[in-house]
Image (cartoon, coloured by chain):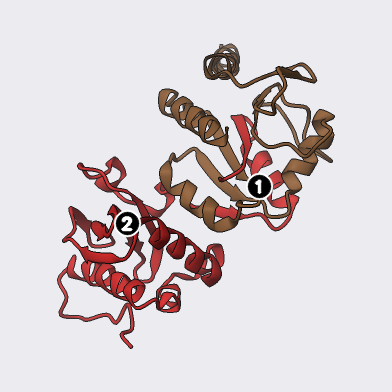
Amino acid sequence: MCRRGFSDMKAILRSLSDDRLRAYIVWLPTLKSDNQAHAEIRITEFADTRLRYFWDGDNATGTLWQSLLGLKVVPWDIYLLYSPSAQWEKAPTVPDYWMHQLGDDKINGAPRLDRAVFESKLKELLNELLLKSRRESK
Amino acid sequence: MTTIIAKSQAESTTEGITRIANEIVEAIQAADYAQIHRAFAKETKARISEEALTSRINILLEKYGKIQKIDPPRVVFPDAGEFPVHFEKGVQDLFIQIDDEEKINIFMFREHRDEPSGEMVSPRVGDQESQMTDLQHIGQFKDIFQSDLGKVRLIVLLSPT
């Protein structure tokens, strides 16, 4: 599952060269075989100047988004999009769009990961940013 | 014991990086991973512990077997080089980048490619993003999220296996 999701994210980053995008891939200790060393190996598979990798050994990010998204379990295989104006004050806001690979078709309104749909939503957010900058420059 | 990064003033511009690559391979063959870790730059040491480095190399050796030989660099600059390394079960490319004091900024094995990778055209530390931050607290992540305010941000939570 994760390999497909990672592969999809790599493909999306390769296809969108827009520098107004930033990506954070967080590796979590979810399965028994998960550890920092495995994450170190995975990060050698793909590099992009807009991408940062993280190892979250305490699953702090998983716990945070579990609460934020109202999930029953600490999630992994989730893909979150945030607009340029999204702020993280006491906590991050609910994502502007998200998908998952958690098993069920829809979870709290979020569909299973579909690369084409996810890429399309990402382009929408980038286009909104472009329109905004054009409006401001007038 | 050989000490990695024993700088020789007689070295030409690219001999240093080649020598360091060879010494890394010798250290791996001798299972002396501490020697490699000692050759890391300060920031690299902070990012990758000796334990993590040892685990990473052991996983590589489990997957590909023992190292048989290292080839001359396909691409080399005074501060960076990419060297095909032959294991019993395949070839991986060793990529290293060093600082002015010949300490290692970037050390990685990656899938062997027939053609040199694009980023080797002008290697710079900031451009090599295959590095990982070990999150100690959620505030670190928050700071990065906030520093990219004004950009579209994609967050992915994944299992590495």
Q: Residue furthest bottom?
A: B1
Chain where mark 2 sits = B
Measured as percent of width and height from the top left, residue A51 is found at: 51, 40
Q: CA distance from mark 1 to mark 2?
A: 30 Å
Instruction: Please determine whether, in this image, residue B53 is positioned above or below residue A69.
Output: below
* Quadrant of res B70: bottom left
Measured as percent of width and height from the top left, residue B98 is found at: 34, 65
Query: Mark 2 = which residue?
Result: B95
Q: Residue at x 49, y 70 (%)?
A: B42
Chain where mark 1 sits = A
Q: Nearer the viewer, residue B108 or B40?
A: B108
Q: Which chain is red?
A: B
Q: Quadrant of the C terminus of chain B?
A: top right
* Disc 1: CA contacts within 10 A as few (<14), some (14-19) or many (>=20): few
Q: Residue at x 52, y 15 (%)?
A: A116
Q: Name the residue type under label 1.
A: Leu
* Disc 2: CA contacts within 10 A as few (<14), some (14-19) or many (>=20): many
Q: Name the residue type under label 2.
A: Phe
Measured as percent of width and height from the top left, residue B21 is found at: 27, 67
Measured as percent of width and height from the top left, residue B109 is found at: 36, 55
Q: Which chain is brown?
A: A
Q: Quadrant of the N terminus of chain B?
A: bottom left
